[in-house]
Image (cartoon, helix red, strand yellow):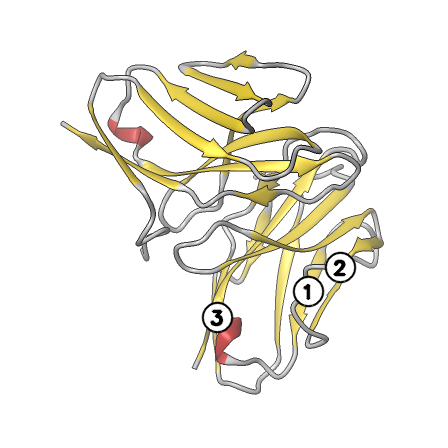
Amino acid sequence: GESVGLHLPTLSVQEGDNSIINCAYSNSASDYFIWYKQESGKGPQFIIDIRSNMDKRQGQRVTVLLNKTVKHLSLQIAATQPGDSAVYFCAEKIQGAQKLVFGQGTRLTINP
Amino acid sequence: GAGVSQSPRYKVAKRGQDVALRCDPISGHVSLFWYQQALGQGPEFLTYFQNEAQLDKSGLPSDRFFAERPEGSVSTLKIQRTQQEDSAVYLCASSLRQNSNQPQHFGDGTRLSIL
């Protein structure tokens, strides 16, 4: 299928290493943040979310960190596997609104 | 299946034709969203429904774009007099409740190509 994100920033990691994907969001009034994973030919797949009253949330092999002071969000993936190869998007929701505003996206590639 | 279903998966149309894209949200989900994703970009918001009410259509790029959700379940995005710049992937998403911080769950989209 056609690739998503042909000219996106790319992060290459060795299989088994930890990955950190960063995102700068735009609006200080955003109260909810989501990380999505998008594989070629598929829709965005929910990974993990965090509300603005938290600064860290953990899931299975993933951790999201939120720094509201500098409007920065990060996704940490532990023990990266080949199946983690995809484009990763952060998205923010402004308080009072319903729509999501997506960041640029980062392509994660796994080296064997 | 239990996820958001979109059809057709691929649509090719000639410039000037009308197209209709369908979205079946997750059963029971109140909120439904349409996004447009250009190649190499993140999804961009088009419109939002709460049940059958279209509460936000601020992202629709022109009056050629029209969306409806008449019974509060299935939604259709219609594009009239298509133009080449309409070529993109059109994504539908649904979430369980409105006015709360709930994740939006996406379908696999309809890839629209205008010749």
**Is A103 rendered above or below residue B113?**
above
- Quarter of the figure with residue B65: bottom right
Front-lying residue, A94 or B49: A94
Residue at 38%, 28% (x, y): give it: A21
The chain letter under disc 2 is B
**Is B22 rendered above or below residue A87?**
below
Place of residue A44 in the rendered image (x, y in percent of width and height, measured from the top left): 49, 41
* SS of the residue under disc 3: loop
* SS of the residue under disc 1: loop
Q: Distance from label 3 to label 2 (Cα)?
A: 19 Å
- Going by the image, does A31 lie left or right of B5? right
One can see residue B2 in this view? no
Q: Residue furthest left?
A: A112
Q: Distance from label 3 to label 1 (Cα)?
A: 14 Å
| Residue position marked by numbered label 3 in the rendering | B87
One can see residue B89 in this view? yes
Disc nearest the viewer among 3 and 1: 1
Any mark on residue A100, and which? none
Say whether marks 2 and 1 touch (CB < 8 Å).
yes
The chain letter under disc 3 is B
Q: Amino acid at mark 1?
A: Leu
